[in-house]
Image: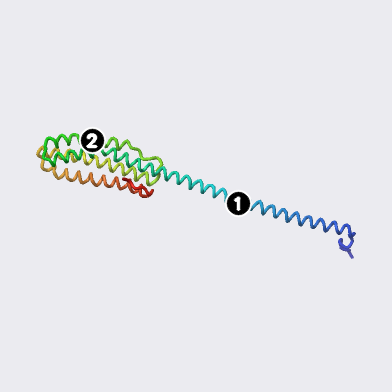
Amino acid sequence: MTIPAAQTQTPEEKAAYQQRQEQERLEKAQKEADNQAKKEAEQRAEAEKKEAEAAKAAAEQAAASEQQKKDIKNFYAQIMSACNGADNAMQKRKDAAQSGDVMGTINAMVAEKDAIGAARSNLQAIPVPDSFNGDDVQKLAEGKQSIVSAMDQRELFIAYMAQFIKGDKSAEQKSKDAIAAADVAMMTGLANIMTVAQGLGVELK
């Protein structure tokens, strides 16, 4: 018959054995606590990192949005400024025509044609702000191009009007069609730009 080891231990050995078991238990508990603390610290660090990244992204987005607001206002102002000379020339031509001044109208048409050419060149030189991307870039580019097309139609109107003044009656309807197309192109172009502005909460004036 084999006698169990515990029964052969002296009281000192038994106490030492129990002490080792207790020490092992404490070490195991401490290790588990350390691992848990480490895990929680890593989770907190990861959460803090994500919060910092989110805050940074939000700040960058806010800064980008503010830049876009400035850029859309400037872009619109450049577009309107580029058209200003042609618009003034058109008004002078209308005033001359309304007063019945044929020579004045012809001279105003020549001046308007030159002003339209200058406006078209100025419009084409205006870049879409690089703070925009994706669909907004396309809308702004198409908007500007539509306004350039409006200038093309206004120049065509002048050409047809010149033919009409020379006696070509068929040019009258063509001139009306050209100016109508110019108005549609201008409104379409401005609408594209304003759509982007509205998306930013900006009212263009």
Q: Which of 47 and 91 is in front in this view?
A: 91
Residue 183 located left or right of residue 74:
left
Q: Which of 199 and 179 is in front in this view?
A: 199
Where does the image place residue 113, in percent across and percent down from the top left? 20, 36
Specify the amino acid type for callout 1: Arg
Where does the image place residue 162, in percent across and percent down from the top left? 14, 37
Quarter residue 82 falls in: top left
Quarter residue 6 falls in: bottom right
Identify the mark at residue 117; answer none if there is no mark: none
Colour convention: rainbow
First reached walking from the N terminus: tag 2 or tag 1: 1
- Secondary-structure class at tag 1: helix
**Mark 2 — residue?**
115
Residue drawn at the location 40% of the way across and 40% of the way down: 130
* Label 2 crowd bin: few (<14), some (14–19), many (20+), radius 10 Å: many
**Mark 1 — residue?**
44
Quarter residue 24 falls in: bottom right
- Secondary-structure class at tag 2: helix
